[in-house]
Image (spheres, grey):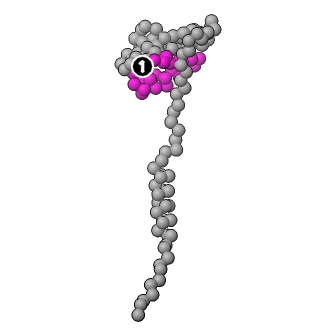
Amino acid sequence: MRKQTRRRRLSMTSLIDVIFLLLLFFMLSSTFSRFAEVDLSTASAGATGSSDVKKSFLQLGETSLRVNGQDVVLGALPDRFADMSSEAETLQVIVSLRDDVTAQRLTDVLVILRGIDRLSISVLGS
């Protein structure tokens, strides 16, 4: 005599538990915050400016920072441009990068410059 074997139904409970745990894990491990954005505009050739716009040239290196040919410390940058922007209605800053500049260094400088009123920033492309 042969025993009849019944097929056992698959239980979906363990599958649902695993899916719930994975969902919980991915929700808790992911970040929903937005990273800070820095607006960039590249300097264009042949752009005409109005007469009330004063231009300034900033050279950025890995360890050096020069404004209009004079060495400046990163912490003194807001005071330097605040004095210049009070003289003119709008101050345009053209940022030139050396080959050794890191993206973090450029971002640090742009964040400081963004905090100054009436300042227009253009980054020269290579």
Furthest residue toward bottom: 1
Q: Is residue 107 visible?
A: yes
User: Circle 1 sits on which residue?
Assistant: 74
Relative height, residue 38 to residue 14 (above, below) = above
Position of residue 69 in the picture relative to residue 37 (left or right): left
Q: Position of residue 75 (x, y in %)?
A: 43, 20
Q: Position of residue 44 (x, y in %)?
A: 56, 15
Q: Is residue 86 visible?
A: no
Magenta residue check for 78: no
Residues packed near mark 1 inside 10 Å, few (<14), some (14 to 19) or many (20 plus): some
> Which image quarter: residue 49?
top right
Relative height, residue 2 to residue 35 (above, below) = below
16, 59: nearer the viewer:
16
Q: How many marks?
A: 1
102, 74: nearer the viewer:
102
> Which image quarter: residue 72?
top left
**Quadrant of the image for the N terminus?**
bottom left
**Quadrant of the image for the C terminus?**
top left
Furthest residue toward top: 51
Q: Position of residue 79 (x, y in %)?
A: 49, 16
Name which residue lies at 44% across and 23% down.
106
Name which residue lies at 48% across and 11% down.
57
Q: Which residues are magenta?
A: 101-126
Q: Position of residue 83 (x, y in %)?
A: 52, 12
Which element type, helix, strand or loop, lies under badge 1?
A: helix
Q: In the image, what residue type sits under mark 1? A: Leu
